[in-house]
Image (cartoon, coloured by chain):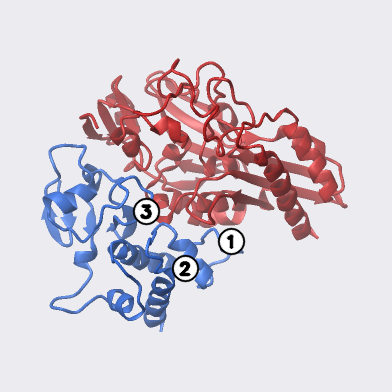
Amino acid sequence: MTIRVNGTEVSPPDDARISLLDLLREHLHLTGTKKGCDQGACGACTVLLDGNRVLSCLTLAAQAEGSDVRTIEGLAGEGDDLHMLQQAFVEHDGLQCGYCTPGQICSAIAMADELRRGDPSYVTRDIAASPAPVTRAEIRERMSGNLCRCGAHNGIVEAIEHMLRETTA
Amino acid sequence: MRTFEYIRAADRADAVARAGSGARFLGGGTNIVDLLRQNVEQASELVDVSRLDGAIRESDGGGLLIDASVRNAALAAHPLVRGRYPVLSRALLAGASAQIRNMATVGGNILQRTRCMYFYDVEGARCNKRQPGTGCDALDGFNRYHAILGASDQCVATHPSDMCVALAMLDALIHLSGPDGERSIRLTDFHVLPNASPQIETVLKPGELITGVELPPPSDAVTHSEYRKVRDRSSYAFALISVAGGLALTDGRVTEARVALGGVAAKPWRAARAEAALIGVAPTEEAFLAAIREELAGAQPLSGNAFKIVLVERTVVALLAALAGAHQ
């Protein structure tokens, strides 16, 4: 069985200890996905596994066999066009150093799908109601798994709000 | 990290049959991958059970059957859980981050290990749980996060799960399958207190696999239930303490009370004494405080966590008052 990474079939590593993150960065040289803490505490390594956001540092590459992996390199279209959310991060100052940005963007794209599905969050007042209202508090709670040490969170939330407005309009 | 073999199980029977003596079952990997990487644990084989059937369905008696491989995010978002067991949805959503909830399985969540920093510090700290008989650096160390109930002089670690606190409140059953067959056990009997052997954390036998969780039909107090978590930052942090609570009222009196506590012990703590003290009383803050104080009478704070006693009191009173208010 293979792993499909941004549409390309790749073989899983022989050593079962290799994480999905190390497969991406060290074996496939897809260095957009970042290694922050390597222990599930920062979100910098977030990728999309069969459309769901996961931490690639705590995913063994072998666990991704038969799955579809999308990384920051797989979001933009052909040519120089950025993904809508990448462009929004630029326009809303959603970054300073940029190290957390690929994880933030992958995370936010999946978060938008979760909102569309009507999934609740910890701050959703009526947990039985669906869908949850899209407020800043909801976005911040849902993005809490992605830390930004530069403190660009206000710009990040604005960029995400921009994407949510554009895709629901 | 030492080498291991990765085995993807075809079904539950295959998983149990293929798990050798040095094997561990692999769910989402959000805890065990880290534990292996830091050499806190070792395994010769990881038997991946995260791809097994993950269904959520009603039981014949009107309860809920949840397969162990269901992801935490899927369970929290399920309409039957949100509508009938709101405390469970809220507890799941209080835990970790969206990414980790997408990965973590129900079985793995129950078996996750303490977040005591001395347990993880292989090179620098003594830990009776990691290496029995070596001592406990938390006793006189940084023990802000540690236990106030049911600890021993060997270990003061807490169980980190939010989900399990709700499951304890809900009288959940854990279904197990192992080399000797299948059995079921109440969640409140599944985790054990440290006593003299803190390396033993559950009643799980060698080779046994958690296959599912069963919730009884929701009582009135469960339908009116909530989970409140107090932590050092408002999201993506383990609990200092947490409370799962549910109340049923008839004619201005408490007819059913359910309270479970997290972050206070090596297991999710069902507050049976507090529950008993609440039956028949008028739902006032004074009555709630008196009840939780009965539960905490045996609390033994450490050098850095006496605040937890007051924090539990206030959080229980606030949660029960909110539930009583919602009944009016």
Front position among marks 2 and 3: 3
Amino acid type, callout 1? Ala
Q: Are marks 3 and 1 on the same chain?
A: yes
Instruction: Determine the chain carrying the residue at label 2.
Output: A
Q: Is residue A118 visible?
A: no
Q: How many marks?
A: 3
> Which residue lies at the image location 53% right of the left edge and 72% below the top edge?
A133
First along the sequence among labels 1 and 2? 1
> Which residue lies at the image location 34% right of the left edge and 32% below the top edge?
B25
Residue A113 lies, with reference to residue B272, above or below; the image says below
Q: Residue furthest bottom?
A: A169
Disc marking residue B26:
none
Q: Mark 2 falls on what kind of element?
A: helix
Quadrant showing the N terminus of chain B: top left
Q: Mark 1 falls on what kind of element?
A: loop
> Which residue lies at the image location 58% right of the left edge and 39% below the top edge?
B263
Front position among marks 1 and 2: 2
Task: For marks 2 and 3, give the CA distance.
Answer: 17 Å
Instruction: Determine the chain carrying the residue at label 3.
Output: A
Q: Is residue A39 left or right of residue B106?
A: left
Q: Is residue B210 left or right of residue B230?
A: left
Q: Is residue B245 left or right of residue B130?
A: right
Q: Using the rendered view, name the quadrant where residue B309 is placed.
A: top right
First along the sequence among labels 2 and 3? 3
Q: Using the rendered view, name the quadrant where residue B206 is placed.
A: top left
Q: Which residue is mark 2?
A: A139
Amino acid type, callout 3? Cys
Q: Which residue is mark 3?
A: A42
